[in-house]
Amino acid sequence: MQKICLIFTALFVLSGCGTVVTLINPTEKYQAYAGTQYDWKMAQKWGMPILDLPLSFLLDTALLPYVWAQE
């Protein structure tokens, strides 16, 4: 049981946070739900970031006022 928890934790941590990745990207302006879109693209390509998709959705929702202030 401990091995399974360790494996899932490692996969979750290694999947990265799509919201943080897109937020600190200096080449593009942050858009609403950009982290969720990034995770979805990576999940289609690699499969693993699907674990981070719900958390990115929550963080993107929390960052909506920031996106609206940029406009």
Image (cartoon, helix red, strand yellow):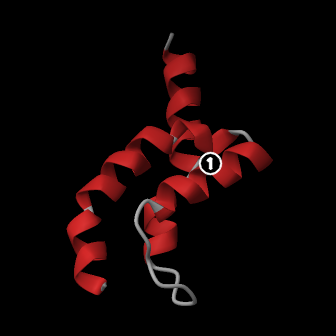
**Residue 11 location in percent, x, y?**
59, 38
The answer to which image quadrant residue 63 occupies is bottom left
Image position of 49 (left or right of 31)? right
Image position of 42 (left or right of 11)? right
Residue 26 lies, with reference to residue 49, above or below; the image says below
Secondary-structure class at tag 1: helix
Residue in the picture at 55% in, 28% down: 8
Q: Which residue is mark 1?
A: 40
Residue 71 lies, with reference to residue 61, above or below; the image says below
Outermost residue toward the top in this view: 1
How many badges with numbers are in the image? 1
Query: The disc labelled 1 sits on which kind of residue?
Result: Trp
The answer to which image quadrant residue 28 occupies is bottom right
Task: Specify few, some or many for label 1: CA neighbours under 10 Å numbering under 14, 14-19, or 20 or more.
Answer: some
Residue 67 lies, with reference to residue 49, above or below; the image says below
63 vs 9, nearest the viewer = 63
Outermost residue toward the right in this view: 45
Residue 20 seen from this side:
yes
Residue in the picture at 35% in, 57% down: 60
